Image (tube, rainbow, N blue to C red):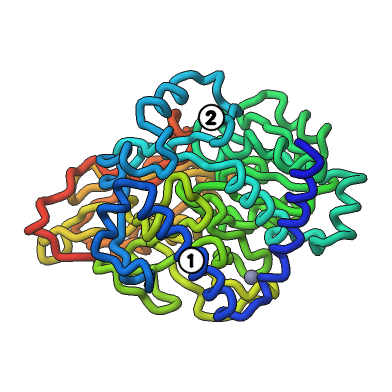
Amino acid sequence: MSLSSTIRYALQTAQLAPQTRWSTRRVERLAQRRLERLVRHAAEHSPYFHQKYAGVNLDRIRLTELPPTNKAELQARFDDWPTDRRLTRSGLEHFLADPSNLGRWYLDEYAVSHTSGSQGPPLVIVQSRRALSLLFSLMSARANTHAKPGIVEGWRRLRTPARVAVVAQHRGFYPSSAAFEFMAEITRPFTRVELFSSTDAELFHKLNDYQPNILVGYASVLEGLALASAELELRSLWQLANSSEQLTSRARERIEAAFHAPVLDHYGTGECLFLSDGCPTDGGAHVNADWAIVEVVDDDYQPVAPGELGRKVLVTNLANYAQPFVRYEVPDQVAWGAEPCRCGNHLPRIARIEGRSAEAFWIHDESGRLRVLPGVVFHSAIDALHGVRQWRAIQLEHDRVELQLEFLPTVENEFDAGAFVEGLYQAGLPRRVRVEVESVIGLQPDPQTGKYRRMVCLVSPPAASSLTGSAA
Ligand SMILES: [Zn+2]
């Protein structure tokens, strides 16, 4: 990294911290200016957006007047979508087909990744060097529980770089892991970054040796480390960060108790990795609303009130000019915080992240009609069980669910399956759905993505005409 890019990175980071105390209106005005610039650029240089915004008045851009977009639509028009016309599906897929390209810039400018494909074919995503630099600057400036970013801290880090450990299931072209491949290059000389594999037999030894200040990993990986914390001696840990997966309250308690350090639950999507930074005091995550616009909406794209779970999220990434995501539909269920938090960051906070709407079952209710049962019914009940290491719920038939629980040693005998299933019924699971609880050993994450799939639906969704909406 050149001296000029080091200085640029340091200045950018220093600038991003004070904005967490700006008024909502001031942040919104800045985001609006960035939105106007992005939308005009997209309409001018992307054939897809040129067509999509044909009826939009580009002199007076209002977010809610822009038509939403989604993965299926962008997949279908992939080659018409990028504003950098050198980016094509075949060129990008060719690059992704070679594993030795991991950690290499495409066209000397873009980090290339693809979504996991758990919901349809994977979407190829490019992130410019500038967007990745923004991601790491935002993390240093706004997700730093250790020190206040500024000249003094920058100077201190030049002398003693912060040590970051990223523990992943395996390396791959998934958005967050692909980004971390470039972290060392972008944040040098302020940070030292090491990538570790969660399946490495020497992992504990290597972490003890490295003594990280910041430990980053999937929620399940961090929880696994917490359960083995007797073998870890991490004396310099400032904080941990969940880079993907849902962080349950049980996992948070376990991790914080084991390491005596806060866990930041960053919520992001592959399409906008810097969407938010975890709140260190009250859970949830603060949206970086100057660089990303989040709309929490119902099925008809109408905003939902703070405290209420939306059915999906519309994400606008204000930093990706090459491949614009504007009002892009993400099937996550989240809720805005209804109460202010205590950490001092005034940016809007997403208080609850309940995972994906796609993580749901189709079940018969008491009157025999098919309904969506959101995963949250299982998530909350199992969260309250403290002896569970990992779990998976599999819907085998419309009225039959198998629940696989992996217990911690010594607690299995105390588990009362009858009382637990009764709790599920009381939480909204119709009584006609039979739940078979199985105790299992060694539940494994999805080998493709390294993420745990907790809700597996083997029942095909019904035809649209027989639906009666959400059960919760
Ligand atoms: Zn906060």
Q: Earlier in the sequence, mark 1 or mark 2?
A: 2
Measured as percent of width and height from the top left, residue 16 is found at 69, 63
**Residue at left offset 48%, top offset 39%:** 126
Q: Which of marks 1 and 2 is in front?
A: 2
**Residue at left offset 39%, top offset 74%:** 308
The answer to whether 460 is drawn above or below residue 368 in the figure is above
Q: Confirm or reject: label 2 Cβ below 8 Å from ligand 1.
A: no
Picture quadrant where residue 161 is located:
top right
Q: What residue type is labelled 1?
A: Arg
**Residue at left offset 22%, top offset 61%:** 431
Q: What residue type is labelled 2?
A: Leu
Measured as percent of width and height from the top left, residue 73 is found at 26, 47
Decide which of 173, 437 is in the foreground and name it.
173
Q: Indicate the secondary structure of the residue bearing disc 2.
A: loop
Decide which of 85, 239 is in the foreground and name it.
85
Badge 1: residue crowd in 10 Å (few <14, some 14–19, many ≥20): some
Measured as percent of width and height from the top left, residue 406 is found at 48, 41
Residue 260 visible in this rendered orientation of the protein: no
Q: Residue 107 carries which label?
A: 2
**Residue at left offset 63%, top offset 33%:** 181
Decide which of 464, 251 is in the foreground and name it.
464
Q: In which quarter of the image is the C terminus?
A: bottom left
Q: Residue 352 carries which label?
A: 1
Q: Indicate the secondary structure of the residue bearing disc 1.
A: strand
Measured as percent of width and height from the top left, residue 329 is found at 34, 56
Residue 422 visible in this rendered orientation of the protein: yes
Ligand 1 is found in which quarter of the picture?
A: bottom right
Please identify the residue farthest to the left as the structure is shown: 465
